Image (spheres, grey):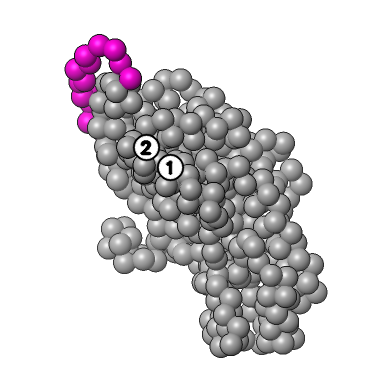
Amino acid sequence: MIQIPIARPYLTEEEAQAAYDVILSGWITQGPKVQEFEEKFASYIGSAYAVAVSSCTTALHLAMVVSGIGPGDEVICPSMSFIATANSIRYSGAIPVFAEVDPSTFNIDPDDTEKRITGRTKAILIVHQMGMPADIDRFKEICSRHNLKLIEDAACAIGSGYKGAKIGSHSDLVCFSFHPRKVISTGDGGMITTSDPGLYQRLKLLRQHGMSVSDQARHQSKSVIIEQYLELGYNYRMTDIQAAIGIKQLEKLDWLVEERRKIAHHYIESLSNIPCIDLPLEQPGYISNYQSFSINITPEAPCERNDLMQKLLNAGISTRRGIMTAHREPAYISYSGVISLPITEDTSDRSLLLPLYVPMKIEDVDYIIRKIREILI
């Protein structure tokens, strides 16, 4: 029976050799490979600096801390995102305020966001959902007018582009993920890009317990260094093993994005004439890496979303529900009570993710398309 997974990381012998070499080097935690990965990542993105951390969740938490966000502050974000988006706000003692999404892009709606700004709002946390860029310029304008911080959750958006530049180069706190479901992976891990030298220095300090000098600097010093711990910090370091893998993955990134876009466009071209399916909308100047490929099932469809997913699974095709909604999870119902976000809820409940990974056989893509057409037409 055909078994097509929802996703699969692209890792080769090159990554295995890179990890092997680091293991034998004797320096396996944060060190020279992390620095090299940061420098190459910043160069690729077009930012002045990049700071490697243990996950995108810890990157988001540090972004909150360096933005001065604390207890009682409000941060507006979408509920329709992986729960780490909202959790990172709560880690700082702040309050997530959920805004609606645009169902054509799955990204946070600027108009609805602005309506939710209060005197307690300190920041807007936008998400480039599934690699599709949000309207960064619009949110920068809103933040400027209301004196708010802008933070970008770009967990899914490595390699995506917005108006001629890579995601990660447009604002001063942009957070990426290297989880296995992402376009490139280090097993787990994250990165923060910034062009603010002050933020860069503080992020490096906070990720390693607030220590005044790094292990690498002490190791390379010709004189004795006694470190100090300047403020409350965290153990959010990336290892050199992960970084060595990341360097090799970064070399393949443009090719991976190109291949993912070919598969996504094949889906779009082949499914566009099915009336009960809404497909992703990529606006002019926006370039998605198609970290995931989602379709929306309209109310006129001959079966509901979950029925379609089960029928596809019966045919050996893995799918996943649409992007979750944090406000309907027990951790948030108990925190803030029942909240109504009808557009978000409808968009999430009608959407599902189709398999997309590299390399993916074209006959598998065609098989998925054929099965969807058999079920819905």
Q: In the image as oriented, which residue stretches furthest toward the top?
A: 223
In the image, 330 versus 173, the foreground residue is 173
In the image, 337 versus 77, the foreground residue is 77
Task: Note whether 298 is above or below 211 in the view shown.
Answer: below
Image spot of residue 356 (x, y percent):
62, 65
Q: Which residue is mark 2?
A: 25
Residue 223 belongs to magenta span: yes
User: Residue placed at 76% from the left, 66% from the top?
Assistant: 266
In the image, 83 versus 148, the foreground residue is 83
State the image quarter where residue 369 is shown. Answer: bottom right
Q: CA distance from mark 1 to mark 2?
A: 6 Å
Q: Are the residues tagged 1 and 2 within 8 Å (C-beta)?
A: yes
User: Residue placed at 48% from the left, 23% from the top?
Assistant: 196
In the image, 160 versus 343, the foreground residue is 160
User: Residue placed at 44% from the left, 34% from the top?
Assistant: 33
Name the magenta segment's main secondary structure.
loop
What secondary structure is found at the residue carrying circle 2?
A: helix
Question: In this view of the protein, can residue 118 be seen by the observer?
Answer: no
Image spot of residue 222 (x, y percent):
29, 12
Q: Name the quadrant of the C terminus.
A: bottom right
**Residue kind at label 1, given as amino acid type:** Asp
Q: What mark, if any, has residue 21 been given in the picture?
A: 1
The segment highlighted magenta reads 220-233
